[in-house]
Amino acid sequence: MPPADQQPPATNPAHPYALFRNRHFARYLTGRVATTMGSQMLTVAVDWELYQRTHSALALGFVGLALMVPMVLCTLPAGHVADTLDRKKIILASTLLLTATSLGLALISILNAPVAWIYGCLVVVGLARTFVWPASAAFLPNLVARDQFPRAVTFNSGAYQLSSVLGPAAGGLLYAATGRAWVIYVLNALASLIFFALVLTIPHRHQRVERPPTTLRSLVAGFNFVYQNKIILGTLSLDMFAVLLGGAVSLLPIFAGDILHAGADGLGLLRAAMPIGAVVCTLWLTHRPPLQKAGRAMLWSVAVFGLATILFGVGNSDCLGRWLNWGHFPAGFWFWFAFTMLALSGAVDNISVVVRQTLVQILTPDEKRGRVSAVNSLFIGTSNELGGFESGLVAWLGGTAIGHTVAQGAIFSVVTGGIGTVIVVIAVAKIWPEIRRYGKLA
């Protein structure tokens, strides 16, 4: 947290929405909604455009790989930069880079350039995100008083999820209406500029500290801190492996197109399902006291996430209905079953996100917060992007590589990933009992 003379004025903690009286936090949150909504629209457009051009699960998996490579290579310097340079300037510079990349994707789409250029742009997107994530995570605690920080994390996560509801749905509908991915890429560039303008208006005085020399020891300080703090290490490991194995998002174009036959607008709705569940969860968390048994709540939430992923994977008329011999279901039943399972997984995942992000920030001293946040973003970002590649690879190995259909491979990938997630929860609970015993989240 910032020094006492720079602490934002405390608001009435009893009122669930008192934080919005803090205009700096409100601006930041508004910008987050805009830029995340644009980013989610872009994700829908990239996935659908790639699948329409390649009809390959592996091509979808390479999206995650392209985003992950710069994250792995640049996380250490990104965390060091966030602890030594002005975090606000890092956020602004990275946002401008994301804007330029969106315009580049628009040009590629208009010219129908080779898909390799799309992956090249995604590498740049991954680079910009690698620097903006730790800077943003370390910037947020300076906007609110310490007693309001858990609620700020809840609202920040809720803002992300709300924009993730609106973004995919809007992106899918726009793509279905226009058939032009470049329109969505341009809109994402505009959303990034809105975020840039709002952050620019937030006053921020960079606390100049004596810069440590850029040595391997200073770069890995975040990893050392995480390794020594078993609660943080356990929570990050739980989230990383659960999302790595249990993520089904990268294969949604296959489910929407080949299994549920829902088209681009259906893809947008499926992508919005998890954020919808997360938004509902955010509202629930906002109107209740801080979690009293946060560790157990996180473990149970990830376990339910895995079970919901399994049900999503088998939940279609050609698989679950035939297996259970339930006969004919009404049109659209399996689409809304899949939607419900995704919404459930999004709701319980949000509990895990709030617990993890709060613990990482309140248990980390400010001078290390950038580097520890970089480690956090590496764990989570790697699990998301490498998980996308893993899902695509397993879908290919379990599908077309052995003579099965793309759809069968996608179902195999999602179901086995959900099973793996449940196994990870059991392992983490055994290896790090400190998590099971962790109490009130405040």
Image (tube, helix red, strand yellow):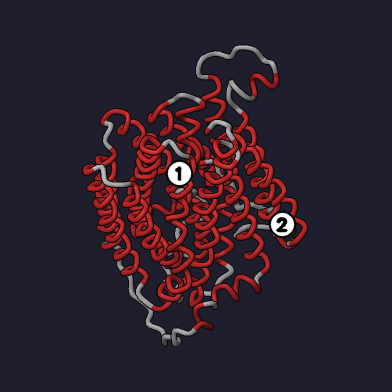
Q: Is residue 172 above or below residue 92?
A: above
The residue wearing badge 1 is: 60
Query: Along the polypeptide, which appears first: circle 2 or circle 1?
Result: 1
Left or right? Give the position of 388 relative to 306.
left
Q: Secondary structure at mark 1?
A: helix
Asked whether residue 286 appears in the rendered view, the answer is yes
Q: Position of residue 374 (x, y in %)?
A: 49, 67
Which residue occupies the foreground of this view, 437 or 211? 211
Circle 1 Cα neighbour tier, 10 Å, few/some/many (<14 / 14–19 / ≥20): many
Q: Amino acid at mark 2?
A: Val
Which residue occupies the foreground of this view, 128 or 347? 128
Could you tell me which residue is drawn at 63 percent across and 59 percent down? 237
Q: Is residue 230 above or below residue 314?
A: below
Asked whether residue 287 appears in the rendered view, the answer is no
Q: Position of residue 216 (x, y in %)?
A: 51, 82
Between marks 2 and 1, how big is the CA–CA gap? 30 Å
Dot 2 and dot 1 residues touching (CB under 8 Å)? no
Could you tell me which residue is drawn at 57 percent across and 26 percent down? 337
Which residue occupies the foreground of this view, 26 or 11? 26
The residue wearing badge 2 is: 428
Could you tell me which residue is drawn at 58 percent across and 14 percent down? 329
Q: Amino acid at mark 1?
A: Leu
Which residue occupies the foreground of this view, 1 or 352? 352
Q: Which image quarter is the C terminus in?
A: bottom right
Q: Secondary structure at mark 2?
A: helix
Could you tell me which residue is drawn at 41 percent across and 67 percent down? 135
